Image (cartoon, rainbow, N blue to C red):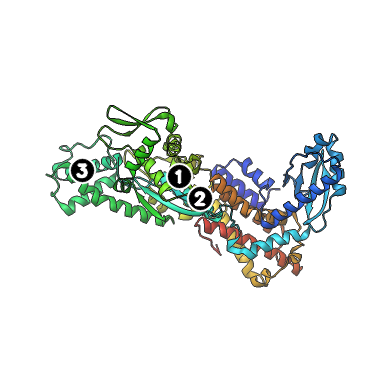
Amino acid sequence: MQSKAQFFLNKILKFIKIIPIDLYLVLKEGRKIMSKIFLEAKKLLRERIKKALDCINKERLNCPDFFIEVPVNREHGELSTNVALVCARTFKTSPLDIAKKIVKNISLGGSDFDFCEIAGPGFINFKFNANFWGNILQDIVKNDAYYGRSDFGKNKKVMVEFVSANPTGPMHLGNARGGSFGDCLASVLDIAGYNVYKEFYVNDAGNQIEKFSQSLEARYLQNFLGEESVLFPEDGYKGKDITVLAKKFADIFGEKYVNVESSIRKKALIDFVLPQNIKKMKEDLKKYRIEFDNWFYESELYKNSEIEQTIKDLKAQKATYEKDGVLWAKASSFNCEKDKVLIRENGIPTYFTADIAYHRNKFLKRNFDICVNIWGADHHGHIARMKGAMDALGISSSKLEIVVVQIVKLVKNGKTVRMSKRTGETIGLIDLLEEVNVNEARFFFNILKANSQLDFDLDLAKKRASINPVYYVQYAHARICSVLRKSYFKIEDLKKLEAKDLKNLCSRSEKELIFCLASYTQEIIDASKNFDPSSVTKYVIKVATLFHKFYTTCRIENEDKSLAKARLHLCLSTKIVIKNILNMFKIDVPESM
């Protein structure tokens, strides 16, 4: 019969559109197991296996490498090795014979393993002893808020640049998803041991600002001359915010700028409006729990002659040529299908040029080891040429990581809510936060990989029930807090338990949960390697699922006081992991619900 935890998980999978078999396999196999204790045990086991091999390898043949991994089915062992299978050809004998000899000669004394046995055609399975499980839980409780941290990143300087929306209007749903993804990725990289710096790139120069100023200018003049007398730019920004801002400018300055040169009027409008838009962006992002270390302005690249220096560097690398008064980038130097314009005939640099200068600033002026850009799906074609530009400047393109975030569909009452930037019907970030709690927004946007299209279900996000994955995880934490509050054992006493006091945690649901908790550090490392924080979101759902299963199948408070204390210690360890992840992703961690 299906457990209540599995029932709710299946409901979650249905609504958030994760393919059930994918997460089922993650829950089933649990291959990513890592804690310092586990790694030490695995390392020692490898040494013992090699010694056993030496006993039967009298001719000192070169043996191929072998794996030690967590098997899919852990009924007969928690670790398994294929050493006998890969050595069969070298020893010219059957894997089963080799496995028997290894089992006969291996010494497990002083290790974390009780015994080993042969399975199938020659695999060897190993079982951990009782103290091993307790050692993992002790490690979690001892490190508490620091559990999961590692020095994997070696303190390398990493910049994560994300959102970077044009300051010409409100931030939209794509920015909301990119914001959640980028902020969560920055947190994952920090926990993985990188020196992380978050930046917002403000496009306050170039064509989009010119189009913005033309749109504002038209709306401003229409206030005094009428809409029929002033044509609105065909490709202008038609959002209602443009009309409101132009009216605000008109109310303050009146007709002062009606009869001046267009360039003076547009500059006055931009100087008035742009700071307000950027201030509003910062306020909205703060509500979304995102704050940047720096807001970098494109205009600074012009003021500091960095665009000029970038052009000089590219010319020195013979990556450019001039034709008909235009400076071109050679396609062969920039991974482009065709040559690209760098400097127009009128002497104005293209957006591509400014972008190259900005990345040159990141690597050569500010010396970042790795730069991660979170871009929208419409920038996909820009990836190859930007990486090519880095190579053309003598900067290894491998240092530039670009993650493309796919589009979002907002679903309400079973129907897609349309949005169109061109017609001014954009659904903005702040609109979303007025509809749903920031916890749901951040969690939902980070529940699938960035390259997957996301359907954001507003109805699901508002549900205060286990079918909502955020609620499901938060409830697991709140349930643990309730258990610990009601217990007659104090938390400080639980923390003093030794590994031998936890050896009776031997049921399947207990071991599955401990195994899962032990994998947290590796989950963080893998997420940092793949630049994919969504894997940690899936992981915390898995932790909650296994805890609910443990809670259902194991009576925590019972007549056996030593077992009760051990199970409470497991609850405490689970609480620590869930809290660490929710804190990392800036999601509320309730102690009661």
Dot in front, 3 or 2:
2
Q: Is residue 110 left or right of residue 554?
A: right
- Residue occupied by mark 2: 185
- Of residues 6 and 531, the one nearer the viewer is 531
**Mark 3 vs mark 2, CA separation in Å:** 40 Å
Q: Which label belongs to residue 88?
A: none
State the residue in front, 98 or 164. 98
Marks 1, 3: nearer the viewer: 1
Q: Are marks 2 and 1 in contact (CB under 8 Å)?
A: yes
Residue at screen point 78% across, 39% down:
62
Q: Which residue is mark 1?
A: 374
> What is the distance, in whole Å, between disc 2 and disc 1 at their CAs?
10 Å
Q: Secondary structure at mark 1?
A: strand
Determine contact: label 1, label 3, CB under 8 Å.
no
The residue at 88%/48% (across/down) is 104
Is residue 162 shown to the viewer in this render?
Answer: no
Is the residue marked by circle 3 packed among few (<14), some (14-19), or many (20+) residues within 10 Å?
many
Q: Position of residue 570 (x, y in %)?
A: 68, 62
Indicate the position of residue 422 as horizontal and vertical percent values. Answer: 32, 38
Instruction: Tell me how far mark 1 sits from mark 3, CA to CA.
Output: 32 Å
Residue position marked by numbered label 3 in the rendering: 217
Kind of residue sitting beneath label 3: Glu
Residue 232 picture location, percent across and down: 22, 37
Q: Residue at image x 46%, y 37%?
A: 391
Q: Residue furthest front?
A: 316
Kindly identify the residue that appears in the image at 53 percent across and 44 percent down.
448
Quarter placement of the C terminus: bottom right
Nearest to N terminus: mark 2 or mark 1: 2
Label 3 or label 2, whichever comes before in sequence order:
2
Is residue 527 something one can see in this rendering?
yes
Residue type at mark 2 is Leu
Q: Earlier in the sequence, mark 1 or mark 3?
A: 3
